[in-house]
Amino acid sequence: MLDTKMSCLLRGIVGVIFGFLALMLPEITLGSFYGFFWVLIGLGMAIFLFLAITSRNDEATLWFGLAAVLLVIGVISFLFSAFVTLLFILLIAGIAIYNGFTDITLALTHPQTKYFIIPAMILTGVALLCVLFYYFPGFEKNLLLSIVGTFALAFGLFSIFLGYYKSESPADADSFVSQKAACTFSRNKENK
């Protein structure tokens, strides 16, 4: 497993790359996500059908049912491709934002610092969005993808910053707590 700092750094790099691609090449990004969605649907159906064929009779019905659900999702996505693509992008963006917030809260050793960093990330994303709207008039052509890309870029930059952020190690924090406890114990002993 990766440690939290490396996880922040890698997710930040992925966020910056996705944000840059979503802002600079929105049509190609939408097309690639639609293709990725179909790859996942096909792979899921193949796995569920394999499990249905190789499992016992009572479990086979469940796996065939799950393969049928994926087939229905595939047919719906074929009929409403733009909607499903945007929904898939929003799902990935929601997962990325949630992972980013959990990485931030785990990466920082001082809990009060997250109350400054998280609003700073959101305000930076909003400010970048306002600048892009003002200076690039064609920005609102793919509005949803532009918003998701802007926030992915801002959150990715903050995650990269947190990947390089140096904090005190847990061993230092434990020694500080034990020193504080020793000082408190000796003070209580002197008061008696």
Image (cartoon, rainbow, N blue to C red):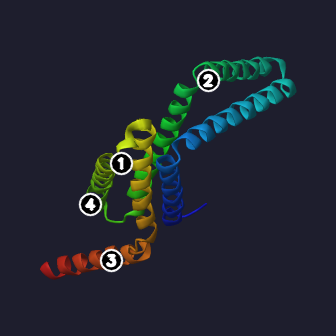
Quadrant of the frame with the C terminus:
bottom left
C-beta proximity under 8 Å, tags 2 and 4:
no
The three-letter amino acid code for the residue at tag 4 is Gln
C-beta proximity under 8 Å, tags 1 and 3:
no
The three-letter amino acid code for the residue at tag 1 is Phe
Residue 85 visible? The answer is yes
- The image shows residue 154 at horizontal and vertical percentages of 39, 55
The residue tagged 1 is 136
Instruction: State which tag comes first along the sequence, 1 or 3.
Output: 1
Which of these two is toward me, 43 or 109? 43
Residue under the point 52% across and 26% down:
83
Quadrant of the frame with the N terminus:
bottom right
Q: Is residue 183 left or right of residue 91?
A: left
Q: CA distance from mark 4 to mark 3?
A: 18 Å
From the image, state whether disc 1 or disc 4 is nearer to you: 1
From the image, state whether disc 3 or disc 2 is nearer to you: 2
Residue under the point 52% across and 40% down:
92
Instruction: State which tag comes first along the sequence, 2 or 4.
Output: 2
Q: Residues within 10 Å of mark 4 (few under 14, many from 20)?
A: few
Residue under the point 41% across and 66% down:
161
The three-letter amino acid code for the residue at tag 3 is Phe
The residue tagged 3 is 176
**Numbered marks: total:** 4
- The image shows residue 73 at horizontal and vertical percentages of 63, 22
From the image, state whether disc 1 or disc 3 is nearer to you: 1
Regarding mark 3 in the picture, which secondary structure is present there? helix
Instruction: State which tag comes first along the sequence, 1 or 2.
Output: 2
The residue tagged 2 is 77
